[in-house]
Amino acid sequence: MKAFRKSWLILFLVLLLTGCASLQEKWDKATEDEKARIMISQFQGTLKSSFILAEAFVKANPQYNEVWKTKVLPMFDFVNRILNDFIQRGKAGEKFTVLQVTSAVAWRIQEIEIILKLWGVR
């Protein structure tokens, strides 16, 4: 049984490494615009996860409710509007760079995450 588990672990690691290599290869072959669109998608995922976590935390800790409503929620809304703007402009044919996308939203997402860490959200 132990050998069976070890075989599965090795197979999993090989598949994981192969998948990572495949993703790296896809990234390397992607155009700058395709990379920017991937970044937009990643930022959306990060923002969504952070929002769900923060919302649950505030429900469990109502002392943060006022700051949540007046400061943090508007920050989430602002970043979402920036990402949606990129998406709409991209649908209209505009091309982007990773630097454009990252510089527009990365620091804003980081601001949100700093507030959540200060609250004790992990």
Image (cartoon, rainbow, N blue to C red):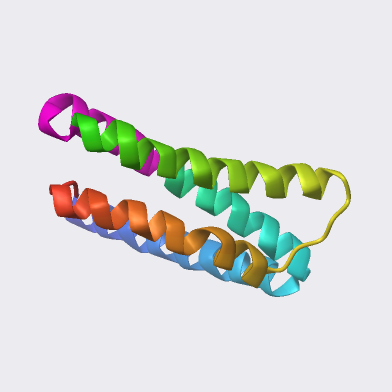
- Residue 110 percent coordinates (x, y): 37, 60
Which is more toward the observer, 87 or 64?
64
Residue at 51% across / 47% down in the picture? 79
Is 89 on the left or on the right of 122, as rendered?
A: right
Tell me what residue is drawn at x 49 percent, y 45 percent.
45
- Horizontal side, residue 70 vs residue 39: left or right: left
Q: Where is residue 21 in the image (x, y as percent from the top left)?
A: 57, 71
**Residue 57 to residue 17: above or below:** above
Q: Does the magenta stretch include residue 63?
A: yes
The number of discs equals 0
20 displayed left or right of 5? right
Determine whether 8 is above or below 20 in the image.
above
Which residue is most to the bottom? 28
What's drawn in magenta, residue-wise?
49-64
Residue 30 visible somewhere in the drawing: no
Please state the horizontal and vertical placement of residue 99, each as a whole percent of the image: 63, 72
Does any portion of residue 71 appear in the rendered image?
yes
94 falls in the magenta region: no
Magenta highlight: main SS: helix
Q: Which residue sits at x=78%, y=69%?
A: 31
Q: Position of residue 71 (x, y in %)?
A: 33, 41
Name the residue located 44 percent from the left edge and 48 percent from the top edge: 46
